[in-house]
């Protein structure tokens, strides 16, 4: 009797009933906080990678450091550039808040990214509990989201914040939507529209959110909401999209050109789906700058087979939720295959929000949902997988620590990317390793004889060395390929200026300003 009594006490304190308390109250959120800080805490000391972060922060510093210019964030593209493609004012607003509050220190930007990621993992947990999943399963799925290596680029790389913000806002909009259909109230209705509005101002793919909510209402919860409330949602969502389109058009221009080319790029890049799917299940071929030419599509095909097999042999799967999760994944991933810039890259941070769709699908497998109910081998195996994912993410985050490490990794994993070699050459130039820089530039030209910016960068080296004839030749070659490149125009003007050819230099500086009216160096030259 003593032994039995002792056993009962142990089970009461540490057994299954007690372990369930892990998922109650605020405990899950505390775990997300501690694990998130342990995984990404070291990134607060990371430097620039010089992939967009320098453009967003260094080049745009005069905007994001001045709170009086907040209105300009909503009237320009994200880079304040001549080539206006991306209308994402919420990203710049978040950078402005960091800069205004803490100055130019990169620590603040990285801390914000970590906090956002922990917040999104918490929202993933709430999202799955709201879908009717047990808190134990929701906790496991949120942990997988928190530690999966595919999330690393969104967190460790400052520009990945755009997907962090998108994830937070879309999930917040979903929680409001689920609350509204559970108990229709104006507060949750306007809350849903508010977060949807912020989401479309964060990234264009958010405009597809009503497709998902519509599918959920029609096929998963058809008994929810009367006709009046359904039309209220449709009208409200339509107004959000209309005003987003209006604001975007006023900021970037109402352009309808390039539609055919965009659709062709989408179709041409469809094989890249296998790159992303492969990394969902087998995140061992990670890359900071993946391209199709260097991708192993076998991982993706094998991962698809595993997912399909797990679903086929699951007795409790629900087809509607499998379609819902697949639709979520496709809707938020495929638009990124439309390459407005022409760069064939498939960066891993674009899997951030689509990953939630993947979790919806695998939650329908008996292996995942059943593992959480087990207290022995299967549950232990599930959490061992989480530990492995944690270690892979921790290791992968290290490649974002500085610009040279980043672009060396890009070249190592994508050796056929001319852009990766070009940018590695630029990093070597910053490090005064001119021989290495020239080798990287030559490799970029070998891979793509018309690679933009490379010859300009070679010309800069010659200009620094006062080899004016060689520099002039390189800048002219660059302008033959890229005639509207403001830096090449300015640099050729500099070459003429140092040769005493002032009139020719002035013409080129004027041409620079005609292409880019905000080019400060050209304006300064002309004012002298």
Image (tube, helix red, strand yellow):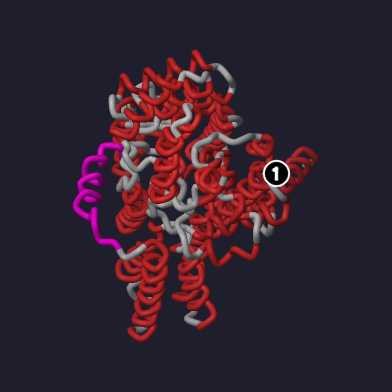
Q: Measured along the vertical axis of the image, is residue 72 above or below residue 281?
A: below
Q: Is residue 333 magenta?
A: no
* Residue marked by disc 1: 105
Which residue occupies the foreground of this view, 166 or 494? 494
Q: Nearer the viewer, residue 20 or 297?
A: 297
Q: Position of residue 385 (x, y in %)?
A: 52, 33
Q: Quadrant of the C terminus?
A: top right
Q: Residue 5, relative to residue 406: is it above or below?
A: below
Image quadrant assignment for residue 250: bottom left
The residue depicted at 51 percent of the width and 39 percent of the height is 153
Residue 154 in sight in this render: no
**Residue at x 49% of width, y 24% of height:** 463
- Residue 477 drawn at (x, y percent): 32, 28
Q: Residue at x 44, y 32 (%)?
A: 501
Q: Residue 270 colored magenta?
A: yes
Q: Which residues are magenta?
A: 255-272
């Amino acid at each position: 009797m003593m032994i039995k009594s002792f056993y009962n006490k142990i089970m009461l304190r540490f057994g299954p009933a007690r372990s369930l308390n892990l998922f109650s109250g605020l405990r899950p959120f505390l775990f997300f906080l501690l694990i998130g800080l342990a995984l990404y805490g070291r990134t607060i000391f990371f430097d620039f990678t010089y992939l967009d972060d320098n453009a967003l922060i260094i080049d745009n510093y005069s905007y994001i450091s001045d709170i009086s210019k907040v209105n300009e964030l909503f009237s320009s593209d994200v880079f304040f550039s001549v080539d206006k493609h991306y209308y994402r004012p919420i990203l710049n607003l978040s950078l402005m808040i960091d800069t205004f509050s803490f100055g130019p220190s990169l620590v603040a930007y990285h801390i914000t990214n970590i906090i956002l990621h922990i917040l999104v993992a918490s929202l993933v947990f709430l999202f799955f509990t709201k879908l009717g999943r047990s808190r134990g399963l929701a906790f496991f799925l949120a942990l997988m989201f928190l530690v999966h290596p595919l999330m690393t680029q969104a967190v460790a790389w400052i520009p990945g914040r755009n997907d962090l913000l998108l994830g937070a806002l879309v999930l917040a909009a979903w929680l409001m939507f689920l609350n509204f259909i559970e108990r229709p109230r104006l507060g949750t209705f306007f809350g849903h529209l508010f977060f949807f509005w912020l989401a479309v101002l964060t990234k264009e793919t958010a405009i597809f959110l009503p497709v998902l909510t519509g599918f959920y209402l029609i096929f998963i919860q058809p008994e929810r909401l009367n006709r009046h409330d359904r039309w209220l949602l449709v009208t409200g969502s339509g107004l959000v999209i209309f005003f987003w389109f209006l604001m975007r058009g006023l900021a970037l221009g109402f352009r309808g050109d390039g539609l055919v080319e965009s659709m062709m790029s989408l179709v041409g890049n469809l094989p890249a789906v296998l790159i992303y799917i492969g990394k969902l299940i087998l995140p061992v071929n990670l890359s900071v700058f993946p391209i199709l030419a260097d991708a192993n599509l076998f991982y993706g095909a094998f991962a698809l087979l595993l997912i399909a097999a797990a679903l086929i042999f699951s007795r409790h799967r629900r087809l509607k939720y499998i379609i819902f999760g697949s639709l979520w994944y496709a809707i938020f991933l495929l638009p990124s295959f439309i390459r407005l810039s022409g760069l064939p890259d498939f960066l891993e941070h674009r899997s951030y929000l689509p990953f939630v769709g993947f979790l919806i699908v695998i939650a329908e497998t008996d292996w995942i949902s059943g593992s959480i109910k087990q207290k022995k081998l299967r549950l232990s195996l599930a959490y061992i997988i989480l530990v492995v994912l944690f270690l892979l993410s921790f290791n992968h985050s290290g490649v974002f620590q500085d610009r040279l490490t980043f672009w060396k990794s890009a070249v190592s994993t994508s050796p056929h990317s001319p852009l990766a070699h070009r940018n590695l050459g630029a990093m070597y130039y910053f490090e005064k390793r001119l021989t290495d820089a020239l080798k990287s530039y030559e490799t970029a030209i070998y891979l793509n004889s018309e690679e933009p910016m490379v010859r300009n960068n070679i010309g800069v080296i010659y200009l620094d060395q006062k080899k004016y004839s060689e520099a002039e030749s390189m800048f002219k070659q660059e302008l033959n390929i890229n005639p509207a490149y403001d830096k090449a125009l300015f640099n050729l003007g500099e070459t003429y200026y140092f040769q005493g050819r002032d009139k020719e230099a002035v013409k080129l500086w004027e041409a620079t300003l005609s292409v880019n009216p905000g080019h400060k160096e050209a304006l300064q030259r002309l004012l002298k």
